Amino acid sequence: MSELVVVRSKIKEVAKGMNVAGDFADALSKNVEMIIKKACERAKANKRATIQPRDL
């Protein structure tokens, strides 16, 4: 598993009033990592070296 790209304490802040499973941050981090990689692919396909909100 790679390093987390999300902050566990911030997840708990956003999910105020809810319990957060111990493995939720890991799963969320994997999803975020995939989203970032797809954004990178889109930017490269458009001949840009900078990912932008529109790449999401």
Image: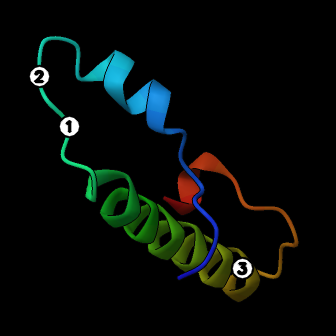
In the rendered image, which residue does mark 1 sit on?
Answer: 20
In the rendered image, which residue does mark 2 sit on?
Answer: 18
Separation of residues labelled 3 and 1 (CA atoms): 38 Å
Separation of residues labelled 1 and 2 (CA atoms): 6 Å
Q: Residues within 10 Å of mark 2 (few under 14, many from 20)?
A: few
In the foreground, 23 or 55: 23
Residue 22 in picture, x, y percent from top left: 27, 51
Q: Secondary structure at mark 1?
A: loop
Q: Residues within 10 Å of mark 1 (few under 14, many from 20)?
A: few
Amino acid on which the number 3 mark rests in the picture = Asn
Amino acid on which the number 2 mark rests in the picture = Met
Residue 49 in picture, x, y percent from top left: 88, 72
Q: Which mark is residue 46?
A: 3
Q: Earlier in the sequence, mark 3 or mark 1?
A: 1
In the foreground, 31 or 47: 31
CB-based contact (under 8 Å), mark 1 and mark 2: yes
Q: Secondary structure at mark 2?
A: loop
Residue 53 in picture, x, y percent from top left: 59, 47
Question: Mark 3 or mark 2: which is in front?
Answer: 2
Residue 24 in picture, x, y percent from top left: 27, 53
In the foreground, 27 or 54: 27
Separation of residues labelled 3 and 2 (CA atoms): 40 Å
Q: Residues within 10 Å of mark 3 (few under 14, many from 20)?
A: few
Q: Is residue 20 left or right of residue 55?
A: left
CB-based contact (under 8 Å), mark 3 and mark 2: no
Q: Residue at x 13, y 12 (%)?
A: 17
